[in-house]
Amino acid sequence: MNDITEGGGKADGIITCDACPVLCRIRPEKTGACDRYGNSAGVLVRMDPLVVTQRAVDDKGAVVPFLEAAERWDGSLVRPDAPVFVTGIGATTTYPDYKPAPFIVASRHDGVDMVTVVSEGVFSYCGVKVKIDTDRYIGPEPAAVRVDGEQIGHVTTAEYGSQMLALGGVRHLTGGSKKEGTVTCAALLALCNKEAVEMTIDDGATIVVQAGKPPIINGVQEARMRVGCGSATLGIFAPQWHGHVDEVIVVDDHITGVLTEHQAGRFLDMPHAGIRVRGRKSTPGRYFQVAEPGSGWGGTDVKDPLTIVERIDTKTAWPGLRLLMVSTTGEDSAFFVLDDQLKPKPAAMPDPIRLVVDRIGENCEPALCTVLFMGGAGGSLRAGVTVNPVRLTRSIKHLRTRVTVGGAPVYVWPGGGITVMVDVTRLPDRAFGYVPTPALVAPIEFTLPYQDYVELGGYTDRMKRIEEVLQMPRAKPSAWRPDNPWPFDRSAALA
Amino acid sequence: MAGGPVAALLPDGRRLHLQHGPIDLVIEAFGAPDEIAAAYRQAVARFADILPTLVAELPALRTPLAEPRWQPEGPVARRMVAACWPYRDRLVTPMAAVAGAVADEMIAALVGGRTLSRAYVNNGGDIAIYLAPGEELRLGVVGDIDNPSIDTTARLTAALPIRGIATSGWSGRSFSLGIADAVTVLADDAAAADAAATMIANATAIDHPAIARAPASTIELDSDLGDRLVTVSVGALDARSIEEALGQGAAEADRLRRAGLVTGAVLVLKRRYRVVGTVPAALDNGGER
């Protein structure tokens, strides 16, 4: 697990820290002599350094190489003149938040005094939504998703080209058995910290999920996300096949497309080929359920594509008919020519057809797992920002206050509370932690104009200038991710 | 797990940051750029060995000093024993001077053979200073450890016999028997200042219902203070109690000054403070802030 190692000597809950030669023996919930490592429920936990990110810009505002002088020292340098944003990573928390947040940072950006309230929130209410780019069958909806036998969530409604999981949430974290909560918390922590987690789905697959990486389903790594459903694939590529082939069947677990029956084929004046596929016809040339879901062609259990052919109409088909069968990713394809008995015989795929099959693959996006952390910051965490918490909620809803998680932009759910979602790949590594509650600890920052902070009852007396924060020995510089909007930008704050 | 010493330049590009376990040093040297670079290299080279050598003698360093005088092997440990020896009748262990002794050892490594105008090694508030003749250093003074900000600045000139500054208080990293928020001591070197600050802070102990204490070992198992009661919180105090505590501390500071152990001291409690002995000009404006 993240930055956690088992310490030695468990008597009385005391552990021995092996982080440095001093070998402090640390009582439960205390820190060692350095204040960098502590005993959290018998586990040695690193009190992480405060991450200060910096946007490197030249005079014209372009991104310039960061930390170019860093080689001179083992550590790293922050250019003193570049704008700096303090993240909540390592800020530590004041849970249950009745004290002001650990860092209330004031800085001047574009002539406006901006205030960033930086904290690490303890999220008792949190979970992750996982999007897995695959058409392969991973299990029925809403099957239990398990780690080490404990249910950590379930399969939820499938979306475009993707299977979705809903994991964590308060019921699995604290509503079930202690082990269920612990396993759920560990799985969420690993997923949020961009580590791989293996899970099993009841009556379904064993999958390995890692943010920003291809999913591994039953031991097979997914490579591509389909270009579209079978019908859409025909719509995109039909004109390019025209003249080189007499029928194209795009095998897809959702909608299998048959070109000459499909609107795309009719549009090209292609004659019916008379090859009938199994399944339930939706509209002309579009068939549901041609096979069972599985890890074969196009998310079906098909290994031999001809098995989905129900019959070949002898009155319509003709000897020499050229048939292409292909999956929605182009990963599986076969070319057949009907013989004199109208039996499909495998044949070498002509180059013009191969070109378009390859083009399907080229147009598929890489299959990835996306992990969105979802947490509720609407509770006591707000009290660390202002004495009047509902004003913070309103300020966020009115887009005056910008919320970021480890500097990454978030989606704030409409409706009550401050429920945010963030793509964990946009955070620095190992930005998340946990407490034994069990609950996740996530960085969170609220950025707003100084005057607004005063008006909503902020702790202006606890404010630190950004220059002071940078002088703190535990301030750890890191490069700003150019794809994250800069929180101080007025336009970003109103986006 | 990462356990080795770490060296980095701080964001201003001028100060060197060295850290190893509980030792956290911020170092700055002033002079010609190549001399500064050479000094920093010397400091980094010397630093690697500091903590391992200390740890080798740690059990003895955590034992109260008593006759006959023990002579440790390690140079930092020797500085610790020397600085604490005057207080051997008070159940003190050499650990009372560890932060200052590390700072002294490191400033020696930093300036040795180099031509610098001035330099300092700040070990978590315990500071060793080097000043070439005629040079001076501006000091920022923090009154409230809980709410750190520069309350005032003072000029330390080379003519003053002060090369060490240390601060002790119950809310700092080390434990205190007393209740002073901060006792800042100026002395010949950082180890002497460190040991004296601990003693003066301990002297600010009074009994009051708003003061909570706990055995040191219940907070930090291996604390050299063992089961002695240390201050864990100080609530609201009446003016009379504040003056009583500050008065005890000031009397102790004056004893140490007359014994030649410190040059001066500033004691802060609940935004009131006392000044004892010689302190640089800006510090010496007395009374209530």
Image (tube, rainbow, N blue to C red):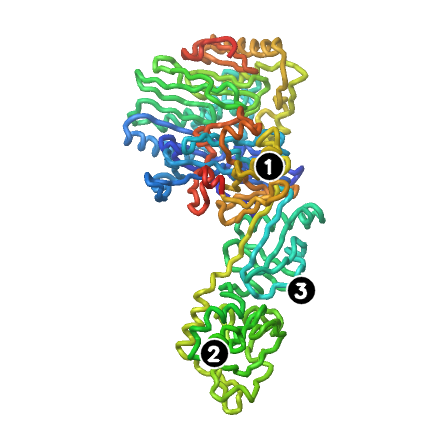
Q: Residue A38: image x %, image y %?
A: 58, 36
Q: Distance between the Cα atoms at labels 1 and 3?
A: 42 Å
Are tags 1 and 3 found on a single chain? Answer: yes
Rendered position, A478 above or below B255: below
For disc 3, the marked residue is A203
Q: Distance between the Cα atoms at labels 3 and 2?
A: 45 Å
Q: Quadrant of residue A45?
A: top right
Q: Distance between the Cα atoms at labels 1 and 2?
A: 60 Å
Instruction: Check disc 1: other Cα within 10 Å, few if <14, some if 14-19, many if 20+.
Output: some
For disc 1, the marked residue is A393
Name the foreground residue: A239 vs A203: A239
Nearer-N-terminus badge (3/2) = 3
Nearer-N-terminus badge (1/2) = 2
Q: Which residue is drawn at the image coordinates 52% and 12% (left, top)? A: B273
Q: Which residue is drawn at the image coordinates 43% and 27% (left, top)? A: B75
Tell me the SS state at disc 2: loop
